[in-house]
Structures are given as structure tokens and as C-alpha cells.
Image: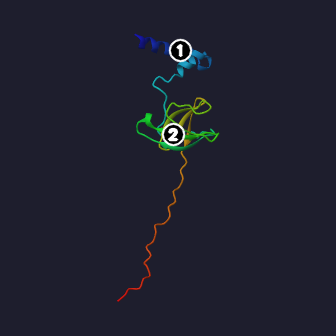
Amino acid sequence: MIDKLYKQNLTQLVQTKPISQLDKKEKKFLNTAFFGDYIPQSIGEIKKSMLNVKVVGILYSTREADSQAIIKTADGQEQTYRKGDKLPGGVVIQRITPDGVLVMHNNSLESLSLPKNELIFAPPPRFIEPNIPLSH
């Protein structure tokens, strides 16, 4: 009964008014995420954030609740954050991936990437044969 009424009201709402004439309540209803917000698994498809913060480390776990990000804020302070935590300025962490952090900033999803530094290793030491004369 409720499903039928819901579908009927939604159909009437969409059929009777152009979207430009909907009031705030009707627009909010049409923009409701009934199945939750979509948060991509990868940060590659999300716009890079211009926030004045820097990801300096990630402790990633396959259990989302266990992942942590170490973030350096504009004042130079480093702090550990988890999903759902707020950064300065009201930015909320939505997901922590092995490559970075997805945040909600002004109702827009943005990415903070973990910088990739190339590791340069010294060549392995060479064996130098000692110059000791052999005695007979």
C-alpha cells in the first residue's frame, strides 16, 4: 500500500510540475539518495582538492573502519583521521584508499592524494679482494 502510494505521489509530482517550479521540499525529495551516497573505490575519478592540507601517510586496511590517514594541516600539525572524521573547515573524510583520501567539501566529493616519492637506492656494495701476499 505504501509503495503504491509513494509511486503514485512521485509520479504525480514529476508529471504535474516542471522541475524549475518545484518548491524546496519537493526538490530535496527528488535529490534524496535512497540507496546511500555513491563513493568510488578509487580516487582517480574524483577531482583533486585545493584544500591546504597534505596526506603524509596512510595506514590502509581492507576493513574500512580500521583505515587511517595521517594528514598535515595548514598550521603544520599532523593528526591521524578515520572515515567520518572532520578536518579543519568542516571537511569530512568519506573513504581512505591505499592511494589517498576522499573528502566531502561543500557537498562535493574531492580527493587528497598520497604523494608518490620515487625511492632511490644506493648500488649494492662491491666485494674488494684484499691485497695480501700469499706466503709459501
Is the residue 79 above or below the residue 6 in the image? Answer: below
**In what quadrant of the picture does the C terminus appear?**
bottom left
Q: Position of residue 47 (x, y in %)?
A: 57, 39
The residue wearing badge 1 is 13
Q: Which residue is at the front of the view, 109 or 117? A: 117
Furthest residue in direction bottom, as rendered = 136
Look at 54% across and 45% down and name the residue there. Answer: 114
Furthest residue in direction left, as rendered = 136
Please tell me whether mark 1 sits on a helix, a strand or a loop: helix
Q: Residues within 10 Å of mark 1 (few under 14, many from 20)?
A: some
Residue 20: which quarter of the image? top right
Q: Is residue 58 left or right of residue 24?
A: left
The residue wearing badge 2 is 69
Is the residue 134 above or below the residue 2 in the image? Answer: below
Q: Position of residue 126 (x, y in %)?
A: 45, 72
Tag 1: residue type? Answer: Leu
Spatial CA span between label 1 and label 2: 44 Å
Mark 1 and mark 2 lie on one chain; the one further toward the N terminus is 1
Look at 53% across and 50% down and name the residue there. Answer: 116
Whether pointer 1 and pointer 2 mark residues with C-beta atoms closer than 8 Å, the reply is no
Q: Nearer the viewer, mark 1 or mark 2?
A: 2
Is the residue 2 above or below the residue 121 in the image? Answer: above
